[in-house]
Image (cartoon, grey):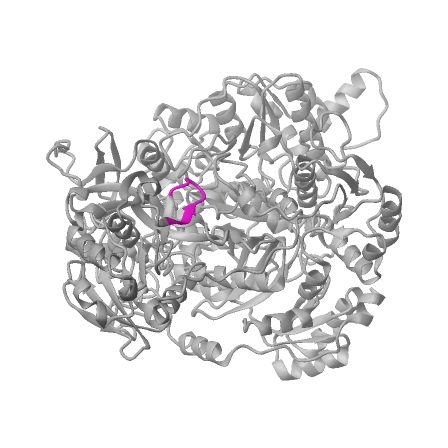
Amino acid sequence: MTMLRSLLPASRAARRLRPSATATARSVIGKNVGATSSAGFSTQSSGDAKPPHLPAYLHLADGSTHVGKSFGKHAPVSGEVVFSTGMVGYTEGLTDPSYAGQILTLTTPMVGNYGVPDRTIIDEHGLPKYFESHKIHATGLLVQDYSHHYSHWNAASSLGDWLDETGIPAICGIDTRMLTKKIRETGAIMGKIEIDDTAPVPDWSQLGSPNERNLVSEVSNPAVRVFGKGNPVRVIAVDCGMKHNIIRQLVKHGAELTVVPWDHPFADEVDQYDGLFLSNGPGDPTMCVKTIDQLKKVVGLSEGEAKPIFGICLGNQLMGLAAGGEAIKLPFGNRGQNQPVINDVTGEAYITPQNHGYAIDRDTLPSDWKTLFTNLNDGSNEGIIHTKRPYMTAQFHPEAANGPTDTEFLFDTFLDACKDPKKEIKFPRRAAPPPRSKVKKVLLLGSGGTSIGQAGEFDYSGGQAIKALKEEGIEVVLMNPNIASVQTNVDDNSANKADHVFFLPVTPDFVEEVIKREKPDGIVVSMGGQTALNCAVDMYLAGTFEKHNVEVLGTPIQVVINTEDRQIFSDKLNEINEKIAESYAVDNLPDACEAAKKIGYPLMIRSAFALGGLGSGICDSEEMLLDMGSKALSVSPQILVERSMKGWKEVEYEVVRDSTDNCVTVCNMENFDPLGVHTGDSIVMAPSQTLSNEEYHMLRQTAVNVVRHLGIVGECNIQYALHPESLDYCIIEVNARLSRSSALASKATGYPLAFVAAKLGLGIPLTDIENAVTKKTQACFEPSLDYIVTKIPRWDMSKFDGVSTEIGSAMKSVGEVMAIGRTLEESIQKAARMVDPANPGFQPHMRFDTMEDLRQELAVPTDKRLFAIAQAMHEKSLSVEEINDITKIDHWFLRRLESIVQTWDRVKEHTVESLPSGLMREAKEKGYSDVQISGCLSGDTTEDQVRASRIAAGIMPVTKQIDTLAAEYPANTNYLYMTYNGTENDVEPQDGGIMVLGSGAYRIGSSIEFDWCGVSCIRALRKMGYKATMVNYNPETVSTDYDECDRLYFEELSRERVLDIYQRDQADGVVISVGGQIPNNIAVPLAGAGVHIMGTPADMIDNAEDRKRFSAALDEIGVQKSWWR
């Protein structure tokens, strides 16, 4: 610490927010959010918004019919059913002309969350500002869950109202994962949305495919239009269904753009432009005969007359056809925002948005054409380039909207060619990567003893790293004194164990001694939390690694210092003009007070090189600053005094970058709680639920820019404060190591971050690492989630007298749970029960007796705030608007919680006999357990009565897979969860095997040691030839690594859910003795339901657990005991 303090720079001011950004924020902050404009638009739905209730039917050409509920225009329509895996951007997608003639299925489970912007706002080009054309082009929309409640500062109406006003039918309540799999396996299929249940099944022979029509002629604007008048490069653009953002991008990059219709004789005007652009569009490219004929003339011009040509999407296909190639129809096309492509010229990989059903067969192209881009998932052609002339194409969408902007540089590449068409097309190239590491023996630093902010997640990360290193044939030396950890196992049951394990403190002196003894040539420091990182920084500054010729794998230590030192971090962000809060790095209290005078109160202080927000907090006065500052400086050499952004949204991205500069964002997460609560103590949702496409990809691109500029290699996370009423944001911090969030992101997505990061540390590029789930694609991709994950922390503050239960910027939780569902209601109710089995779900728990106490709990959060919200909603004592005003929790989250209570209110009017099956199903879809329902119903009702009633009504959960790609590609994954929001099981029953129940959330008295027990049990069972199923919900654990077992159910450890799994998979027995108290507590109820408990019988377990029975048993055998009552 002394060495760190002496090397830190003197205090000086960090950059303020950019004035333009601040001004923008202020201009929007002042508006009355939620108010209705003169046009009738509103930024959020009112409390009386009603969910869809009219039935609608989806008929498919394969003979199946699927029932849902109608929203949008209540009318029939037919079209080709396709799917898109994008998690945001429904307004941009629906107005993309490439969807003409198609019924669009969105795989993201909840749609409509952020409403729809004002349709009347026009940008500087005279185009609708927030849309990709002047109308919706998809003929219909299919979603699993429609959010009739919406909330966003830029919203003007609900999605349903917009669809209705434009005449577009839509259905919700469809199992979109089932539908996606159907399309994946059989190809795009004809479908019809029907509203009349008496209407006959369509005669498909009479419903022609839209691909038989010239869809381009239907969507192309017949007028000639000019944009960017006076710009230096003259480009003629052929509108085959041109997205508005293409126009915006070409003009922004310097083109005077003349947009002409698809059948315009542009070949006759070759002398009037510097380049030719071919747009995206819908349907079969061979229908565009007139365009292809014109293009053949341009392509065939003499050498001196040749003009640069750039085609996008359909434009790529038209170019290929004009060149003499052939187009092929893909089985289901590529539609979404996470398609990885590689530039065959430079070898660089990009994440791209796509929307097409056809591709060019590269094998049919003439010899003077070659492949420019290739899809890394399916190997299809993604673009072509002429070997001698300035002609190039891209099958994807570099203009994005919706989607990532990784390839926006192609517009500059094209316009540069237009300026000098005789030169060869040049693509920007990244710096050459360093040579791949040749280490043979690696020292891996663990995290040491379990502590708040540093627990089992690093056992999981370290174990993944060991597996990755061993897979590459590297000898691994592990240094970790935590005897309860799985990674320190050296028994034969561990397939990927370290070669040498040292149970020694992770301190510079001991690490150097191990280096002297073992002589490793490499060291991994990013898998052991802040303990390993701080130790490595000290050793780096002391020259220890250089002295012993040990290579630090992954992110260089200087880069770690650049992220941990608050002043250097601020300076690095200034270099790329990124936004941080006004802040000052100081190393003493007088300077802290001076900084506070400049910033004003309230303000935030953050500690450098600290774990779990230690030493951080919000200060409302100088007295608080002096108190908190003195404590922070006692554990850290430096603190940052920063403008408070309490109440802003907090968003986090997990980012991976390799040594060749390929960079992807693996997971984005949004805190339920606004800024002011440490993310480790906040309820967190993945993926984000209230961010629009613009916000999501703005922060994604910022993350990529920052990570590249800092030079991180491996995995990191970046945290943002996002203003709730504007596009203003600030970067809070970057953790250049694996963290608790990394473990959560890995389990939430199925992407093994630590495993991949360890391989990246060896210099292996993302494009050479296999996707561990699909086994068919590779790790250079961004997962798409067709479910929602909720993380809720576990606190044990009640175990200590006098400890404040308030939660803030310093982490206090000892563990966390992760629940998976296909609606927020299902996910958060699961999570509430997982945190503590005493919580029935989202309902009052430990009631607040006075309104003053209730308001105080909402305003100053403790570990009970979620239940305070439940009390306010159940008792109708506070409205959603009032709760939002007190907590600043987004209206959308609160409306979804309100819907849970509304279902309760309807259920409580019934007995188990009178409860309609539709309402029973609704309750289960909203995440209600059988126990909850039994407690809600009138009369004395048991859990078993509810279970029997719903089973008799055919209401059973279905099993779904976590496959990283929203069912777009087949995945033989054993990573499973159960949901009532679906109609099809992804996997067949296992037919036997042994279930092992995990320990649930870490808590005082039940921690990492039970994960060791569970993993050891699974490994032993599999070694003996048994199929082993793990049931657990703790994302920090090794036991929830899907590689460890035959089946992993990320599910509740409740009687109901264990029975669901046990009965469906026809398990041979259940092991409860390795998971601690939570499995033990359900032993008797499980045995009573007919479950075979392996090992000690349930009655004997109860004999030991029940103090009265235990005492009587001791008396019976004459064993003395202490007196008790």
Rendering coords of residue 61 (x, y %): 21, 32
Determine whether, in the image, residue 162 is placed left or right of residue 843.
left
Count the marks. Answer: 0
Quadrant where the image shows the N terminus:
bottom right
Quadrant where the image shows the C terminus:
top right
1092 shown above or below 505: above
Q: Residue at x 29, y 80 (%)?
A: 230
790 shown above or below 567: above
Which region is colored magenta?
370-380
Q: Residue furthest left?
A: 206
Q: Residue at x 48, y 41 (%)?
A: 964
Q: Residue at x 71, y 25 (%)?
A: 493
In the foreground, 966 or 499 = 499
Determine whether, in the image, residue 482 is placed left or right of residue 1027.
right
1057 shown above or below 432: above
Rendering coords of residue 944 (x, y %): 47, 25
Magenta residue check for 501 = no
- In which quarter of the view is residue 1077 placed? top right
Rendering coords of residue 739 (x, y %): 65, 51
Q: Residue at x 66, y 51 (%)?
A: 435
Determine whether, in the image, residue 624 is placed left or right of residue 429.
right
355 shown above or below 496: below
